[in-house]
Image (spheres, grey):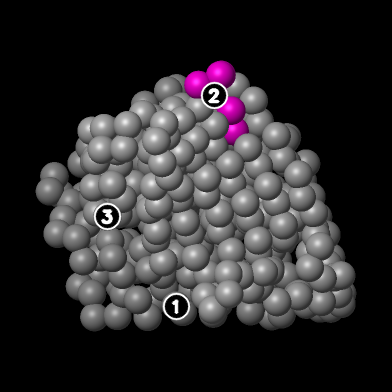
């Protein structure tokens, strides 16, 4: 299916950054209960299932995934809970149900915007993991749809919930270091090569047609599912939207800026020769008129010495450099 046609067919979209404080609706749901469904359970989704189920007044009623192993992770995360969730593999069928209030999306990136659109068009509030879309055009659609359908949408950029960063931002905005005008951040890791995938039969535990969903169709290969899809343009968004959006968002927060007026980026696949398509090494800058600037450096396959992974934020201001480190 053509991705653009798929998105047009789902009516229009929605993803403004708001706080999840759901109006308590949903057919059959008591007025003091929020009933949710979770899509994508291999990693973050299973974690969400466990954590949402711990909140008073929240009930996880449905789990949605196209792979049996991932579904089992979600079911295991909810063992011992008062309600046993119903399993539905097809998100389109799930969203026709009227007995839940909100959809949580933790599927691969290419599904984020289409699933959000479907959820909104079917009267659901949405929590969608970052990035909220596979490309900028979809983000525009999401904003339009959120306004059209009047539902709440929250994007999972969780760094703004970290107490240490909340305190640091408060101090910076309070003038502890003067007026900052430049922020520098980076993400490093020691990811290994993914090799050259072989076209093989789809495992019987996976519905690959549903997994691809709105993406252009490609043959199944043995180095794609579960995680390596991040590094293919057809389904993923590379390290810049896998981790870079966290660091860049924090820099925006520290500098108190919104949209950049100019963006430049350069990078490539330098570490290994394999199927990996997105940059493993990237440098991007975000300018905000002639007032402030942010830089981000991504090194997916070359970590800092002695550390597997680290996120660092620096702020430049009139007098000196300040460092905020999150391991």
Q: Position of residue 279 (x, y in %)?
A: 74, 55
Q: Position of residue 47 (x, y in %)?
A: 38, 68
Between marks 1 and 3, how big is the CA–CA gap? 31 Å
Mark 2 or 1: in front is 2
Of 67 and 186, the residue lying toward us? 186
- Name the residue that disc number 2 marks: 288
Element assignment for label 3? helix
Element assignment for label 1? helix
Between marks 2 and 1, how big is the CA–CA gap? 43 Å
Task: Looking at the image, tell me whether mark 2 or mark 1 is earlier in sequence order.
Answer: 1
Element assignment for label 2? strand
Instruction: Name which residue lies at 32% across and 61% down.
Output: 61
For the C terminus, give its image quadrant: bottom left
Would you say 313 lies left or right of 190 here? Answer: left
Instruction: Name which residue lies at 67% across and 55% down.
Output: 238
- Name the residue that disc number 1 marks: 73
Of 235 and 302, the residue lying toward us? 302
* Bounds of the magenta segment: 286-291
Where residue 108 sits, quadrant-wise, is bottom right
| Residue 233 visible to the viewer | no
> In this picture, is 187 found above or below 293?
below
Asked if the residues shown at circle 2 and circle 1 are in contact, with their CB atoms under 8 angstroms apart, the answer is no
User: What's the mark number on residue 164?
Assistant: 3
Q: Does the stretch in magenta take in 124?
A: no
Mark 1 or 3: in front is 3
Asked if the residues shown at circle 2 and circle 3 are in contact, with their CB atoms under 8 angstroms apart, the answer is no
Circle 1 packing at 10 Å, graded few (<14), some (14-19), many (20+), is some
């Amino acid at each position: 299916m053509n991705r653009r046609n798929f998105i047009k067919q789902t009516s229009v979209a929605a993803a403004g950054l708001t706080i999840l404080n759901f109006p308590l609706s949903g057919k059959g749901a008591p007025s003091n209960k929020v009933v949710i469904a979770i899509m994508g359970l291999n990693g973050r989704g299973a974690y969400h299932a466990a954590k949402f189920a711990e909140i008073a007044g929240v009930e996880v009623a449905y789990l949605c995934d196209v792979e049996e192993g991932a579904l089992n992770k979600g079911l295991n995360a909810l063992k011992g809970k008062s309600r046993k969730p119903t399993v539905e593999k097809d998100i389109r069928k799930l969203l026709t149900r009227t007995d839940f209030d909100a959809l949580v999306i933790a599927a691969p990136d290419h599904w984020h915007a289409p699933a959000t659109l479907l959820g909104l068009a079917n009267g659901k509030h949405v929590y969608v993991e970052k990035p909220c879309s596979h490309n900028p055009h979809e983000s525009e659609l999401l904003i339009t749809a959120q306004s059209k359908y009047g539902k709440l949408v929250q994007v999972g950029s969780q760094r703004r919930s970290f107490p240490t960063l909340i305190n640091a931002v408060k101090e910076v905005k309070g003038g502890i270091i003067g007026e900052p005008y430049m922020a520098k951040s980076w993400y490093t890791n020691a990811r290994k090569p993914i090799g050259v995938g072989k076209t093989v039969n789809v495992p019987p535990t996976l519905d690959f047609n549903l997994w691809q969903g709105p993406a252009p169709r490609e043959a199944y290969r043995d180095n794609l599912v579960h995680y390596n899809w991040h590094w293919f343009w057809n389904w993923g968004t590379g390290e810049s939207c896998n981790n870079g959006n966290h660091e860049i968002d924090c820099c925006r927060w520290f500098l108190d800026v919104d949209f950049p007026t100019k963006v430049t980026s350069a990078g490539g696949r330098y570490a290994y020769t394999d199927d990996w398509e997105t940059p493993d090494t990237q440098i991007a800058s975000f300018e905000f008129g002639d007032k402030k600037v942010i830089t981000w450096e991504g090194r997916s396959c070359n970590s800092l010495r002695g550390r597997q992974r680290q996120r660092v934020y620096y702020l430049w201001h009139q007098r000196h450099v300040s460092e905020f480190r999150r391991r």
